[in-house]
Amino acid sequence: MDVRLLLRGGGIFLALLVTFATNINDNFISRMGLDPNYGFIIVAALLITLFVIDRHEMIIAVVLLFCLNANMPTEFSLNLGFDRDYYTGLMMALLLQPLTSRLMV
């Protein structure tokens, strides 16, 4: 296994873990109806890391940015002009679009 890939995956995982844990009572996971505990946060960060680990750096940066905006308090994202759920939808579209295009071909 390549050491650079492991370091990249570890960095993405830590960034997503911090992003999900910033607003634990009102983040993306709690809005989906799950308990806001650290087990779900670790699983969500690991799944998103596995989806983006081999993608281009720009896509990784955009996913991290959308994840950060989706997990911020409501007032923060409304100041930017969009609801937090739009950022969540864009993040999920970036994650799942390559998977669906591979399944269709």
Image (cartoon, helix red, strand yellow):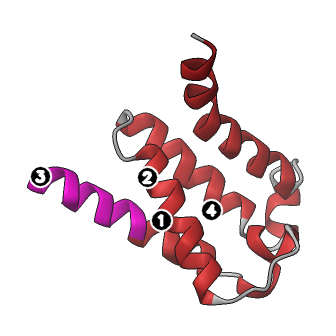
Mark 1 or mark 3, earlier in chain: 3
**In contact (CB < 8 Å): disc 2 and disc 1:** yes
Label 1 vs label 4: CA separation?
16 Å
Q: Is residue 3 magenta?
A: yes
Where is mark 2, residue-wise? 50
- Indicate the amino acid at tag 2: Leu
| Mark 1 residue element | helix
Query: What is the CA distance from the residue labelled 2 to the residue labelled 1?
Result: 6 Å
Task: Determine the secondary structure under disc 4.
Answer: helix
Q: Say which of marks 1 and 4 sits in front.
A: 1
Q: Which residue sits at x=76%, y=67%?
A: 28
- Disc 4 designates what residue? 68
Quadrant of the drawing holding the C terminus? top right
Which label number is shown at residue 1?
3
Q: Label 1, label 3: how many angstroms apart (C-alpha)?
A: 18 Å
Q: Amino acid at mark 4?
A: Leu
Residue named by callout 1: 46
The residue drawn where x is 14% and y is 52% is 4
Residue 19: percent from left, percent from top: 57, 71
